[in-house]
Image (spheres, rainbow, N blue to C red):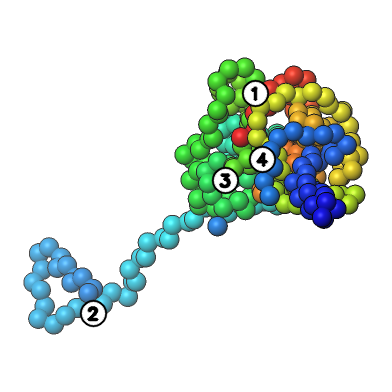
Amino acid sequence: MRGVLAVTIAAVTAAVLVSGCDSSEPSTGGTAAPAVPSPSTPSGTTPSAEPSAPSATPTAKPSPSVKPKKLKPGTEGADVLALQQRLTELGYWNGKADGKFGGTTQQAVFALQKAAKLGRDGVVGPKTRQALDSGVRPEARSTDGVVVEIDLKRQLLLLVADGEIEQIFNTSTGSNEFYEQEGETYLADTPRGKFKVSRQIDGWRDAPLGLLWRPKYFNGGIAVHGAPSVPAHPASHGCARVSIAAMNWLWTNDKIPIKTRVWVY
């Protein structure tokens, strides 16, 4: 009987282990088990009893309104340049405006769509354009100091200084799905809480669960790091992914130094 009880307890424990994307370091935090008008009579003439013949000249039709074209990856030109400049003006990080809709611009569009609670397709259609024109931005929760805020519901990473948002990034955090590693079952979640950046690696970290570019660790094996793939939905093992270009910018401008506060909510 004691043997059966021990096996049962071990199985339950395995089902609730939590690991960051770098499982070589322990993580802390909790777990969780889309009618034709009549012709006019010229002045000074007598109208004829017979109707006049219709004019041979057709009535000009109004020109149809031209709808703005959708902007998507691969699009180039002045419209894209204006998009990039507007995104930058609103704080959505998208690198240097160059008139080319690439992956970096798509990441910023993802972030805008998340903030506006729109479908996350990375394409600038009518609704996304309206959000852009309206100046939609998220709101910060912190009020003092420099804080990295990670909004799990909207999947946004915010750089905040004294309550003012300086930069907004698309991020992808823990998928909240179970996965197996070395015979153990772990939950891929990003625990909520307040933390501080405790260590960093300036380069690739070949972690047991994959490669992390220039990670900034704030909760055991959980870090903000660059990744080649940053979808618009939760997909990581627990870390907060941003694009490679975004991570390089964060390092170059020393935006998340050691001891920076990180608030996950």
Quadrant containing the C terminus is: top right
Q: How far is the residue under mark 3 from the one under mark 2?
A: 58 Å
Question: For the point 51% across and 38% down, which residue is it?
Answer: 136
Q: Is mark 2 on a helix, strand or loop?
A: loop
Q: In this view, does 4 lie to the left or right of 118?
A: right
Going from N to C along the chain, the mark reached first, 4 or 1, is: 1
Identify the residue under disc 4: 170
Identify the residue under disc 1: 147
Q: What element carries label 3?
A: helix
Identify the residue under disc 2: 53
For label 3, the crowd category at 10 Å Cα-Cα, with few meaning under 14, some 14 to 19 and many 20 or more, is: many
Q: How far is the residue under mark 2 from the one under mark 1?
A: 79 Å
Question: For the point 65% across and 20% down, which residue is it?
Answer: 146
Q: List the single residue furthest toward the bottom.
A: 50
Tag 3: amino acid: Gln
For label 2, the crowd category at 10 Å Cα-Cα, with few meaning under 14, some 14 to 19 and many 20 or more, is: few
Viewer-nearest of discs 2 and 1: 1
Going from N to C along the chain, the mark reached first, 3 or 2, is: 2
Tag 2: amino acid: Ala
Identify the residue under disc 3: 113
In percent of width and height, residue 179 lies at 79, 52
- The answer to which of 28 and 157 lies nearer the viewer is 28
In percent of width and height, residue 196 lies at 72, 23
Going from N to C along the chain, the mark reached first, 2 or 4, is: 2
Label count reads 4
Q: Is mark 1 on a helix, strand or loop?
A: strand
Going from N to C along the chain, the mark reached first, 2 or 1, is: 2
Q: How far is the residue under mark 1 from the one under mark 3?
A: 23 Å
Visible residue check, residue 265: yes
Q: In this view, does 125 lie to the left or right of 210?
A: left
Going from N to C along the chain, the mark reached first, 1 or 3, is: 3
Visible residue check, residue 105: no
